[in-house]
Amino acid sequence: MEYLIHIAIIISIYSILSLGLNLILGYTGQLSLTHAAFFGIGAYAIAIGETKFHLNFFLALLIGIVVAGLLAIIIGIFLGRFRRDIYALASLGTNVILFSIFLNWTNLTRGPLGIPGIRRPEIFGFIFQSNFSFLLLCAFFSYLTYTILHRLLKTPFGLTLKAIREDEDVLSSFGYKVKTIKTTAFVISAIFTAIAGRLLASYITFIDPSTFDFNESIYFLSVVIIGGLADLRGSILGTIILVILPEALRFLGLPSDLAANLRQILYGLALIMMILFRPQGFLGKYKM
Amino acid sequence: MNALTTTKLTKHFAGTKALDELCLEFEHRKITGLIGPNGSGKTTLINIISNFLQADSGEYTIHEDAKLNSDLSQTNQPKFSRTFQNVRLFDQMTVLDNIILVLNDKNFTNLFVNDNRLEKKATNILKKIGLRESAHKLAGELSYGQRKLLEIGRVLASNSQLILLDEPFAGLFPQMIETVKKHINTLKLHGKTVILIEHNIQLIRELCDRVTVLNCGKSLASGETTTTLSQPEVLGAYLGK
Amino acid sequence: MFAQILTNSLIAGSVYAIMAISFSLVYSSTKFFNMAHGMIAVVGGYLVLTLTKLLGLGAIPSIILGIISTGLCGVIIHFIVFEPLKKRQSSSTTLLVASLGVMIIIQAIISILFTSQFKTLGANYNLGNIYTIASATFTEINLVTIISALSIFAFLIIIFKYTRFGKIVRALNDSEEVATIVGIDTKKTIRYLIFIGSAIAGVAGILTGYDTGLEPTMGMRLLLKGIVATIIGGTNSLGGALIGAYFLASVENFGIWKLSGEWKDAIALGLLIIFLVFRPRGIIRK
């Protein structure tokens, strides 16, 4: 039972991330390879906030949202000037640079040593110590993310995102401020990713830079593409499949190193298969 | 004051001059045909005016007609609306959405507010162009003629005074040509200024009050349709066509 | 000090140059950013490792076999994954994403087969001689690296300028459509180019294996340096790739004189960003 709760927590946390990434990747059509960095920013914000400044979870959450948001504005504006492949390259660049900062700004992040001892969140005296209570917290955030994005996508803003994906120059000629729209979508997506990072940090109570390198960005990409671009349910489905499948490997009793590598092969294969045979993913509304 | 004036507009493409210090004027509320041999700069001119290209030098100005009651409820209204030679629609979005995108309030903060009247407005426009039944089809699923009609629909939906049409009749069969002609005349009735790129001289004669002839990026002749079309230089440019 | 930094730049730059040249070849023929290209280089290194350490072959035959096999690897992957996608007119972005999948698969397979520990090639072959010129030291491998880079470059220039194959490649670069119409077998030519490009990448992996060692994650680093160098130098020119590579290595090595060594990657990517923003066509003005 504990194991199931653990899986459910992982699924909830990563679903927030997938939903956020789908907004920028599936709906707006921007191939962002930098999201692992924002995942990390969320995690480090909580970690540093709690261990260095002894802030409580929710205050650190708020500050983390502001930090992630500001950084996302800068990076979003910067990336917005590129299209397609170059966008992907440039976003890869920002991921690597931010990862370098996680790794090398040892005064703040303790570099490769990581930050241990992150506590579970506490609100009004109640500590989310039990995994079950933590699951409820994560599920709540996941539900919140889904609802907010669902509403957002029904507005004219959501419509413009899809149009940007198709032909941003024509949309621009209608009089829309396309740059602002793109940046906003990026910021929203980055903030949700950071929130997921925060939750992860509080759950595993220890973080180090390796969780936020470029390979992670590729995993996130896979989940969204496989689940389905431009469909929120697809992101949930993709997360469930790509969390459960590798876990199934554990049951084969494989050593964790091997399991991790097999998981990577699985993601890579699933990604390639999808692109070759079903480019819209399982539930997607848009073909890559 | 003219609807559109260009001053010494120049544009190079890999060594050739697509536009060569072009100075033109287009009158308000008239349909002006823009003709000339292939490569004379017609589409380049339209692309520059609609911000799809940057000119290398020179300027252009779009003057809005003060007499026309412009819909001031929307800011960020572009000064022009256009169609494309190679039809650029949002193919993976519905026909209805393609129109709604033109009707939306472009103001950034208003993007987060739903306006329920727009769907009705969009449907009415689809009725006018005969695409009502295809409202929920994806634009990419339409036939070629329907796609061109949808582009006209987008133009009808916009509030802009200056309309730029790049070969809207190309590839259409006669029945559709009549439909498009009808819509272009409606635009004129509503006081819009239309610049029409077209190769079919018959259509130019039927629709246009004025005509501007380009050749090698320069203006060859410009003026009232019948007189301009009978000028020897114009005939000369077309005999080689 | 200065001489050492210069020497280091020359050495590092040579590896980057080999990567950049190979990447440039592959990119100009397939027209998309193949993110798995770095892993191809790594495959080369590990192939030589297998041949020498596990099968006991001599260094020279292993290297030759390794280079050829790496070339074949590249073509096979292209054939299985990218050709089908290209056939259905997939966008370059789609191909990029597919290449990410290929990249992580190769990386994981190598990790499984060889573990993620550092492995060196030729440990029994004791680094060779160490030379010193004007207070700058470098090893025999470093010398071989520099010579290899310049030789590969010269070799390719000669091929592209003076052979029939070179003419075909230039025609293909100009316009794939026209080349097909004129009767050039573009598919076959592209495969040859990928073979050559992958083989050259393998050289980079092998040289690095002899110099600092192999580990599965080095593919990304090699690829990034190759891409940055190509963008700095301009994607259409071999000479540009060379210049870009040495320029990148110089900025890195002079940069870490003041900062610490771990910031090398960030410097490289920073340079990429600067060029993407200010000079996307590369250092050479057309």
Image: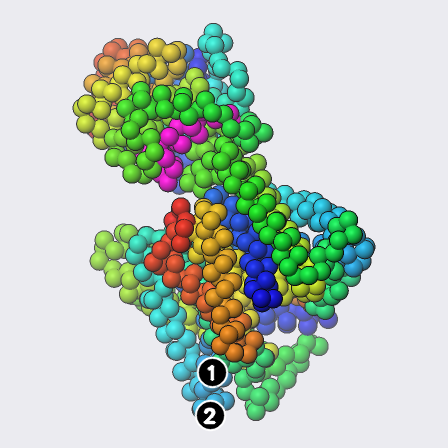
Rendered location of residue C251, percent (x, y) = 64, 61
Mark toward the start of the polypeptide (2 vs 1): 1
Amino acid type, mark 1: Val
Q: Residue furthest right?
A: A53
Callout 2, which amino acid?
Gly
Q: Position of residue A136 (x, y in %)?
A: 63, 53
Outermost front residue: A1
- Residue ID at (59%, 62%): A5
- Check if residue C94 falls in the magenta segment: no
**Mark drawn on residue C48:** 1
Instruction: Please state which of residues B114 and C129 is positioned toward the viewer in this rendering.
Output: B114
Q: Give the residue drawn at x 42%, y 87%.
A: C61
Bounds of the magenta span? Answer: B85-106
Residue placed under numbered mark 2 in the picture: C56
Q: Write the residue at 68% across / 46% down.
A: A65
Above-or-below relation of B222 to B41:
above
